Amino acid sequence: MKSVHLSALRESGRRAAMVGLGTAAVVGLVSSPAQASSWMSSLSNAGPGFESRRWYDTGGSTTVEFTNCTSGSSVANVTLRKDVDFQVDPQYSTASFTNCFNGYNSTSSDSWDDHGSGNYYFAVNYGGWTYLTVRVVDVYY
């Protein structure tokens, strides 16, 4: 009698574990990533100091990614900036994108963390002299 009872408990425990694992897998598939918003675009002959569209970020991390860059140079300098009314827009560190110049599917990206909530944009080649074309621009925030 005792062994039958233990066997039944083991079987129900296995079933509960399988249901738990299945539920965890489904929840993992539908949960949203840390960077919940994004937009995609392209650049065509963006001049020095070009400013991207603005987006509202609640804070956290922002990633800018360029795929397939062409320019008179082999580097694209990308600076994240915060759009502040009636003030000079603060700027965060400048990333030098070089890998995106290595071919059609070559990508360069960088991330900026903990910059607070607000309206943001990126500027390219601020103070530079070259024009930049980028086949795919992805921004995750």
Image (spheres, rainbow, N blue to C red):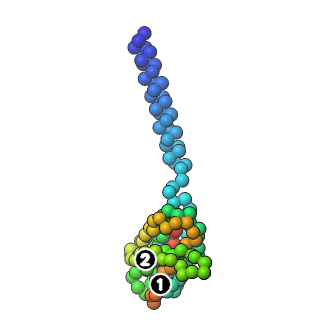
Residue at image position (57%, 76%) is: 84
Amino acid type at mark 1 = Tyr
Whether the residues at callouts 1 and 2 have beta carbons within 8 Å, the answer is yes
Q: Which residue is disc 1 drawn over?
A: 126
Helix, strand, or loop for circle 1?
loop
Q: In which quarter of the image is residue 56?
A: bottom right
Furthest toward the top, the residue is: 1
Q: From what the image shows, is residue 96 above or below residue 140?
A: below
Residue 91, position in %: x, y?
Answer: 48, 77
Identify the residue shown where x is 50% and y is 47%: 28
Q: Which of 1 and 107 is in front in this view?
A: 1
Instruction: Determine the image quadrant of residue 1.
Output: top left
Q: Is mark 2 on a helix, strand or loop?
A: strand
Instruction: State whether residue 106 is above or below residue 77.
Output: above
Locate residue 18 relative to residue 53 in the image: left or right: left
Question: Within 10 angstroms of label 1, few (less than 14), some, or many (20 or more) residues?
Answer: some
Task: State left or right for residue 123 relative to residue 97.
Answer: right
Residue 120 in the image: state x and y as whole percent. 55, 72
> Alpha carbon of mark 1 to alpha carbon of mark 2: how far?
10 Å
For the image, the number of numbered tags is: 2
Residue furthest front as drawn: 87
Q: In the image shown, does 65 or 80 lie closer to the viewer?
A: 80
Q: Position of residue 111 (x, y in %)?
A: 44, 67
Q: Which of marks 1 and 2 is nearer the N terminus?
A: 2
Of 84 and 39, the residue lying toward us: 84
